[in-house]
Image (spheres, rainbow, N blue to C red):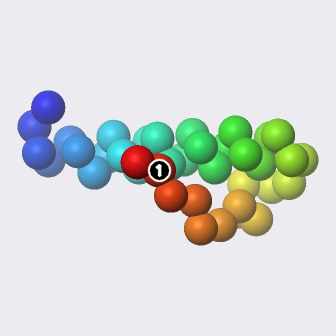
Amino acid sequence: IPKENFTAMTRLDQNRAQSQLAAKIGVPVKDVKNVIIW
C-alpha cells in the first residue's frame, strides 16, 4: 500500500466505525465523537 493511501484508508475505517456505532444506538453520526480505531 503506498504511504499516501494509508491516511485515506484509515479515515474510511473510522467513518465506518462511527456509522455503525450511530446505527446501533440510534443517533445521528454527527453525535458520535472520540472514536479511535487501531
- Taking the view exactly as shown, the residue that stands out farthest to the top is 1
- Residue 11 left/right relative to 8: right
Give the total of numbered labels: 1
- Circle 1 is placed at which residue position? 37
Residue at 77% over, 48% down: 22
Q: Determine the secondary structure under disc 1.
A: loop
Using a 10 Å C-alpha cutoff, classify the residue at mark 1 as few (fewer than 14 neighbours), some (14 to 19) or many (20 or more): few
- Taking the view exactly as shown, the residue that stands out farthest to the front is 38
**Relative to 31, does residue 9 appear above or below in the rendering?**
above
Residue at 65% over, 67% down: 33
- Taking the view exactly as shown, the residue that stands out farthest to the right is 26
Image location of residue 21, percent across then percent down: 73, 46
Image location of residue 13, percent across then percent down: 46, 41
**Relative to 27, does residue 6 appear above or below in the rendering?**
above
Image location of residue 5, percent across then percent down: 20, 42
Q: Quadrant of residue 6?
A: top left
**Residue type marked 1:** Ile
Image location of residue 31, percent across then percent down: 76, 65
- Residue 34 left/right relative to 27: left
Residue at 14% over, 31% down: 1
- Residue 6 left/right relative to 20: left
Residue at 11% over, 45% down: 3
- Residue 21 left/right relative to 4: right
**Relative to 33, does residue 9 appear above or below in the rendering?**
above
